Image (cartoon, rainbow, N blue to C red):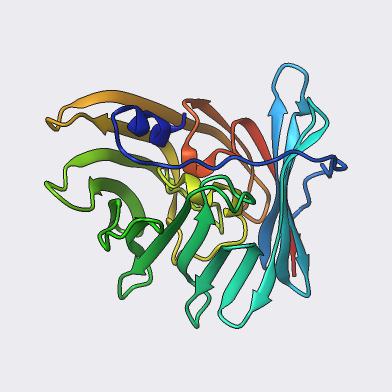
Amino acid sequence: MNYLKLLLITGLVLGFFSCSKEISEEKTNTILPPAGDCRISQVVPYDKATNKARGAYILEKNNDLPSKVILYDSITGNTVFSIGFTYRKDSVVMGEGEYFVLHADGKVKELVIHEYPGNSGSEQFRYKYYYDELGYLKLKEWYLLSSQDTAPLFVYNYFWDNGNLVRCEVREGKGEKRLVMTSEITYDLSLRAKDFLYCFPESNELSPFILMIDLGKKAKNLPVRVVVQLYNANGVAEDKYVTDYKDYVFTQEGYVAELLIEGDVVDGLSVVQGLTKFNYTCK
């Protein structure tokens, strides 16, 4: 579910990630038995009825650095997006006027991207990311670069409890600074997340890059439910979206091999839907 599109309907100025299509070859390998230091290199959504892959989200590397991310759609035979990376000092460049700025330790400091990535004629946004002293993401600001206003459009505050992200509050960046969105995450505290995916439910700008970005420490445990709510001008919740994560399957080494996601699509993890399996690259 594109929560931010629903915010646009309320009259707020927002942009959305959309991508062009091009032909590509599908890559859906058998899940590797991870050993050693492993990272997810493919996310593969499956059709439960036929047990066939519906596509693949792929991270390619060159000399251990991310070189490209690809989202392939098996149904249409097209690539939904294919984004390559060029490294320049403290920046990772995706295209004209689109880049990440990194801290010295590799964590994302800023993201500059167009409303329609690859289309330099569309609105350009800047996202700024801030971390606490323990290395957890604590704050995000969203700016419209064409605006003369120095205040952000929206401010995101992240709340962590015992190593897990449990809540995000999104407020207007100026004026009354109204609450416009919240997300809450519930975890199974008996399941440890061994280098699993980040789960920032409201962060649609990060979804295409979820396998290659460093946004600080990840949650300690695995999510079982995400609840997103949108609020009207009076601060009353009007829309509610619920997503359940269940049926985790693990490798012998404790990495997530597959899981089932039911309910609404989470913006920040839009590449992970339904029955999803994971492939790993290990050092």
- For this view, does 167 lie left or right of residue 50? left
- For this view, does 265 lie left or right of residue 95? left
The percent position of residue 235, horizontal first and vertical second, equals 14, 33
The percent position of residue 184, horizontal first and vertical second, equals 31, 40
Q: Residue at x 27, y 46 (%)?
A: 170
Q: Residue at x 57, y 63 (%)?
A: 97
Whether residue 211 is visible: yes
Q: Give the total number of marks visible in the rendering.
A: 0
The percent position of residue 277, horizontal first and vertical second, equals 68, 39
Q: Is 211 situated above or below 178?
A: below
Q: Residue at x 85, y 40 (%)?
A: 23
Q: Nearer the viewer, residue 42 or 268?
A: 268
Q: Residue most toward the top? A: 49
The percent position of residue 19, horizontal first and vertical second, equals 65, 41
Kindly indicate the quadrant of the structure image that contains residue 8.
top left
Q: Nearer the viewer, residue 4 or 9?
A: 9
Quadrant occupied by the C terminus = bottom right
Q: Nearer the viewer, residue 36 or 175?
A: 175
Q: Residue at x 56, y 59 (%)?
A: 195
Whether residue 279 is visible: no
Q: Nearer the viewer, residue 228 or 35?
A: 228
